[in-house]
Image (cartoon, rainbow, N blue to C red):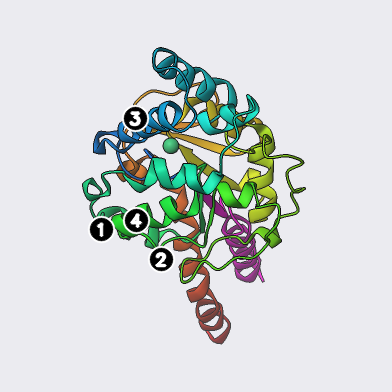
């Protein structure tokens, strides 16, 4: 009896912890899954400024400051431009700013791939970028099959007319799964770091924020993620920032900084051997 009681307690403890410190890992993509040093970020900003100059006819001397100020105020420069009443096609904008990026600088990352594949939790991308860019980046990094889904620009800002989704092999969270109200006008862009975007992602992915770790390189996104109740990891920083639980200089250091992610898997294995252990004790 005593032995069984102790076994029962062990099983309860294992079941309790196995149920999960973390059930889901939510990853930003750009400058989080690959380092800023690839130059993609800089090239993207240059393309946005070119678009403002050549397509929106904004005066050249105003473009750099406006680009930065809108980014700071509205989450993305694009969202700021829309809020200011500039009219342009979202897909055309994305094709212009991402279509000419130096994607060749992104190389397959087998180390990160192995780390991701060894994590037992659900893994989801949450990016402000559009789905074409997300697919391109994940493919270049060799990570396209490491995630359950991608929450991207189109997920949070579904097209007004079309609800269709034909994403081919890459599984994206379809627009129709979202219960987000369609935008009332094209000026209303939902993106990080707004709490609205955070809460929408949590709802769409159907995750418990208390059991989810959110990785992002942006200080303001981390603050917003914390406000939404997520565990937070600032990536690309060796020091903590407001709202961050953990700081990671590189996503490659994830195992050293967050060994808890792998704990559930080890305990699952332990649980799977336990029934035979119980049987052995009973037979003895
Ligand atoms: Mg980022």
- C-alpha distance separating marks 3 and 4: 33 Å
| Eye-nearest disc, 3 or 1 | 3
Callout 1 environment at 10 Å: few (<14), some (14 to 19), or many (20+)? Answer: few
Q: Return the disc, 3 or 4, that comes first in the chain's sequence.
A: 3
Can you identify the residue that label 2 sits on?
A: 145
Tag 1 or tag 3, which sits nearer the N-term?
3
Please give the label number shown on residue 46.
Answer: 3
Residue designated by label 4 = 115
Q: Please provide the residue range marked out in magenta.
A: 1-26
Mark closest to the chain's N terminus, 2 or 3: 3
User: 244 or 8, which lies in front?
Assistant: 244
Residue 258 visible at all: no
| 239 shown above or below 30 | above
In this view, the mark in front (2 or 3):
3
Q: Which residue is mark 1?
A: 110
Q: Secondary structure at mark 4?
A: helix
Residue 275: percent from the left, percent from the top? Answer: 55, 78
Report x, y in % for residue 262. Answer: 43, 55
202 is higher (above) or lower (below) than 274 = above
The stretch drawn in magenta includes residue 21: yes
Give the quarter of the image for residue 38: top left
Earlier-in-chain disc, 4 versus 1: 1
- SS of the residue under disc 1: helix
Does label 2 or label 4 sit earlier along the sequence? 4
For the N terminus, the image quarter is bottom right
Q: Does the magenta-highlighted stretch encompass residue 238?
A: no
Distance from Cα at disc 2 to Cα at disc 4: 13 Å
The CA distance from mark 2 to mark 3 is 30 Å
């Amino acid at each position: 009896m005593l032995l069984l009681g102790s076994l029962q307690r062990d099983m309860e403890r294992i079941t309790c912890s196995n149920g999960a410190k973390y059930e889901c890992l939510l990853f930003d993509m750009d400058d989080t899954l690959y380092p800023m040093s690839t130059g993609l970020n800089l090239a993207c900003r240059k393309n946005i400024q070119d678009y403002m100059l050549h397509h929106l006819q904004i005066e050249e001397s105003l473009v750099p400051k406006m680009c930065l100020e809108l980014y700071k105020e509205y989450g993305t420069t694009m969202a700021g431009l829309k809020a200011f009443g500039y009219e342009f096609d979202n897909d055309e904008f994305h094709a212009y700013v991402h279509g000419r990026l130096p994607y060749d600088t992104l190389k397959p990352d087998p180390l990160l791939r192995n780390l991701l594949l060894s994590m037992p939790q659900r893994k989801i991308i949450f990016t402000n970028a559009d789905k074409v860019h997300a697919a391109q980046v994940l493919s270049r990094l060799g990570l396209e099959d490491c995630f359950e889904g991608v929450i991207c620009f189109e997920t949070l800002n579904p097209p007004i007319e079309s609800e269709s989704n034909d994403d081919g092999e890459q599984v994206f969270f379809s627009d129709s799964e979202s219960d987000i109200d369609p935008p009332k006008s094209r000026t209303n862009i939902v993106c990080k770091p707004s709490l609205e975007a955070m809460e929408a992602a949590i709802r769409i992915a159907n995750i418990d924020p208390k059991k989810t770790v959110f990785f992002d390189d942006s200080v303001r996104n981390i603050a917003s993620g914390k406000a939404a109740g997520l565990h937070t990891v600032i990536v690309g920083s060796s020091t903590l920032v407001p709202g961050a639980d953990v700081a990671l200089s590189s996503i490659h250091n994830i195992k050293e900084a967050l060994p808890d992610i792998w704990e559930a898997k080890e305990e699952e294995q332990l649980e799977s051997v336990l029934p035979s252990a119980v049987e052995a004790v009973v037979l003895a």
